[in-house]
Amino acid sequence: MRSLALILPIVLSLAVPAVAQTPAPSAAQAAQRDRMKSCNADAGSQKLAGSARKGFMSDCLAGKAAAPAKELTPQQAKMKSCNVDASAKSLKGAERRSFMSTCLKG
């Protein structure tokens, strides 16, 4: 018990300077870490994986802006809307084709 009481202060006195010597990250390192967090969150929200994620992360970290999303034509928007409705109704086969045809006409 006595030896523990003698050793503990010695160990603590050696550990404190080691922790105190860790330098704070520079402004550039902090900015890079923030950029990495942001790019990683964006890649996750886009559900990217594999080479697509790697390419996205490379471009994002390099500061290259992603290409703006292409606007849908009115026909594409209508098709997308009808497709979502058909999926929500769990339509398959001939029922889905009939629904899509009716939806796209009107």
Image (cartoon, rainbow, N blue to C red):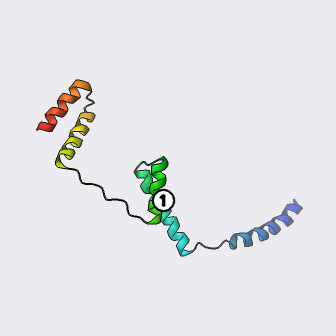
Q: Residue furthest right?
A: 3
Q: Is residue 40 visible?
A: no
Residue 87: in sight, yes or no? yes
Residue drawn at (23%, 29%) of the image: 96
Q: Nearer the viewer, residue 90 or 70?
A: 70
Left or right: where 8 falls relative to 74 = right
The N terminus - image quarter = bottom right
Residue 61 lies, with reference to residue 53, above or below; the image says: below
Q: Measuring from the top left, give residue 62's x and y in whole percent.
A: 46, 65
Task: Name the amino acid type tagged 1.
Answer: Ser
Q: Which residue is mark 1?
A: 58
Q: Residues within 10 Å of mark 1 (few under 14, many from 20)?
A: few
- Dividing the picture into quadrants, the one containing residue 21 is bottom right
The quadrant in which residue 66 appears is: bottom left
Which residue extends farthest left? 106
**Residue at the spot 85% in from the left edge and 65% down from the top edge:** 7
The residue depicted at 12 percent of the width and 37 percent of the height is 105
The local secondary structure at tag 1 comes to helix
